[in-house]
Amino acid sequence: MKKNNKKILALIAYILTAFLGNLNADILDVEKDTLKFGFIKLTDCAPIVIAKEKGYFDDEGLSVEVEAQGNWKELLNRVINGDLDGAHMLAGQPIGATVGFGTKADVLTAYSLDYNGNGITVSNDIWKQMKPNVKKDAAGKVIHPITADSLKPISDKAKSNNAKLKMGMVFPVSTHNYEIRYWLAASGISPGFYYDPGTKQRDIAGFLNSDVELSVTPPPQMPQTLEAGTICAYCVGEPWNQQAVFKKIGVPVTTNYDIWKNNPEKVFGVSAAWAKENPNTWIAVTKALIRAGHWLDASWENRDEAAKILSQPNYVGAPYKVIKNSMTGTFEFEPGVDVRKMEDFNVFFRYNASYPYYSDAVWFLTQMVRWGQLTEQKEDSWYDQMAKKIYRPDIYMRAVEELVDDGEFEESVFLPAYKANRAGGYKAPTSDFIDGKTYDGKKPNDYVKSFKIGLK
């Protein structure tokens, strides 16, 4: 009987502790508690979806509706005009909008949704032509990363026949556009320019002086556009590379992890006007997203659960087995032949992935200059000023402090974030690129000048 009483008392103490713990977790005095967020049907919208499904937004006193958008332009415009309170955005979108490439508006981010997550897929016919040129080991297995060296003779022949290869990417300021351009240019294939300083000619399509033609296709439409023969290759996020494998219509040849290891991919963006009106709400949203990103990287079981959630038609809507592949650390290249473990294909929290580094913003600005989206050369100080205007690690760290004060996390979980903040928000120089070039975010002009193909 005494033992039973002790068990009952222990249970009551546990419940009271849990209850009082929740009472001690301060809820911010948010300015707006009913919110609508937009997303595109890609697996890297996961932190937003998980924050909703796991009740992390609710815990912050926020009622959030999550709504799929038709394309990136529509999504950006709806954030700018206030139809959406915030959104899953391409990392380059807040930057492109703020500097005025395309729609001009001040858009900010305090949260990086993920690292990596993209691939470049070619049609079966292009792969058949590329494969003899690809390096292989003694056993005949393809050696990764596959560079565009294996594509160059095919591209050269198509150009000489006045039939340039047509390829897809998702948006002019998308990571996908810059990644496929980087991959092509590293092997001597010009992806084209938006501006020619010699003739002062501008081309919104970016076809000037190109060896191939890159055009915009919304992510979910990539596989069907490839299957129709409109394009012969594309760069897109998951699950639309693995979808090509499952449908047997194409072969992924590389991932952006191999083009730039642990590169920033998507961010959570808000308009500057919204941020000014809702500072506490912004911090509360960031808290919920941090919890979601941490949950996603906590275990493979969580990733599997996330794949099931994302497969729902109101979210990504692709088959669970397709989403599960990359989300649980497996990536299939040549169907049934080249299946590899890639545990860092999707990263949501590890490696300080959710911290908005200034150096990441600077990299996107260098690519805008390299390809002529920005037509004037800038001083190094300009890059720093723009990065600090758009990326807001101060908001991220406010959210971190709130989460630690709430008792949700130990401070040690965020040691990389504290270290990044002390370092001024810049990463150390890295050479983790497919061409081995070194990028130092504090020396953007040196980096731009280092490329053989690109405006200087």
Image (cartoon, grey):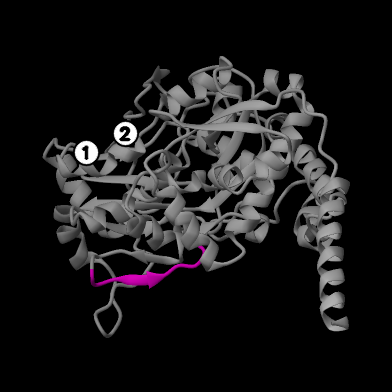
Residue receiving disc 1 = 225
| Residue farthest to the left, as pictured | 161
Q: Quadrant of residue 280?
A: top right
Which numbered dot is residue 217?
Answer: 2
Q: Is residue 108 magenta?
A: no
Q: Quadrant of residue 365?
A: top right
Is residue 328 left or right of 184 when viewed as pictured? right
Q: Quadrant of residue 268?
A: top right
Q: Decide which of 165, 88 is in the foreground and name it.
A: 88
Q: Residues within 10 Å of mark 2 (few under 14, many from 20)?
A: some
Q: Decide which of 123, 433 is in the foreground and name it.
A: 123
* Residue at image location 65% in from the left, 44% down from the top: 289
Q: Position of residue 303 (x, y in %)?
A: 51, 61
Q: Position of residue 180 (x, y in %)?
A: 38, 46
> Tag 2 or tag 1, which sits nearer the N-term?
2
Q: Decide which of 6, 388 is in the foreground and name it.
A: 6
Q: Position of residue 17 (x, y in %)?
A: 86, 59
Q: Which residues are magenta?
A: 336-344
- Identity of the amino acid at label 2? Thr
- Identity of the amino acid at label 1? Thr
* Residue at image location 84% in from the left, 50% down from the top: 406
Q: In the rendered image, is residue 416 in sight?
A: yes
| Residue farthest to the bottom, as pictured | 138
